[in-house]
Amino acid sequence: MKFYITVEGIQKLKRSFLNLKLFSIINIPEILADHGYGSSGLEEHQYFIVAQKIQGLIKNYTKSKRIRGIIYCNPNLTREIVDNIMASLEENEKISDVVLLDDYNVPRVRHLYPLFPEVIFFPSIKKIRLIECKEIKDRIQWKLPDFDKKN
């Protein structure tokens, strides 16, 4: 099962993909709203509660036989969040790959591309199945800036 990470919201996913019924979506803004938290300025215990909720959802979703993948939507995605997700997914043998989903025409998380073994892009013309998205394996084509100097 693949684990997809994106900064885009559910509306963009619905406009882009045909087979979302086969995927479970972890929507971070919805989880924060359910707990009465704002999108910024979480305290340490609030981070813990949200992280536990996310881990519980991942555990439940990976038990399902009908689900083909999990989509993690977080508009405030950072390098630290990606590192935490990757570390927590290492223990889960049902997750085979972690994939970054981004918009090709207006990339929002280009700085995170080097953290992922696979990056795929939202379709720009018509709806397609998520598994039909083209991936870019050649990092030379990404035209990434030198991250070590900026960070």
Image: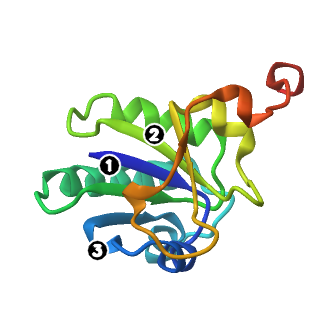
SS label for mark 3 = helix
Residue projecting furthest to the top: 148
Find residue 138 and report its horizontal and vertical position in percent.
62, 28
Q: Residue at x 66, y 28 (%)?
A: 139
Mark linked to residue 8? none
Number of residues whose C-alpha sits closer than 10 Å to that of mark 2, classed few (under 14), some (14–19) or many (20 or more): some
Query: 58 or 15: nearer the eye?
Result: 15
Residue 37 location, quadrant: bottom right
Q: Amino acid at mark 2?
A: Ile
Q: Residue at x 66, y 56 (%)?
A: 76
Find residue 130 and report its horizontal and vertical position in percent.
41, 61
Q: Earlier in the sequence, mark 1 or mark 3?
A: 3
Instruction: Tell which tag, 1 or 3, sits nearer the viewer.
Output: 3
Query: 56 or 94: nearer the eye?
Result: 94
Residue 17 location, quadrant: bottom left
Q: Are marks 2 and 1 in contact (CB under 8 Å)?
A: no
State the residue position of label 3: 21
Q: Amino acid at mark 3?
A: Lys
CA gap, disc 1 to disc 3? Answer: 21 Å
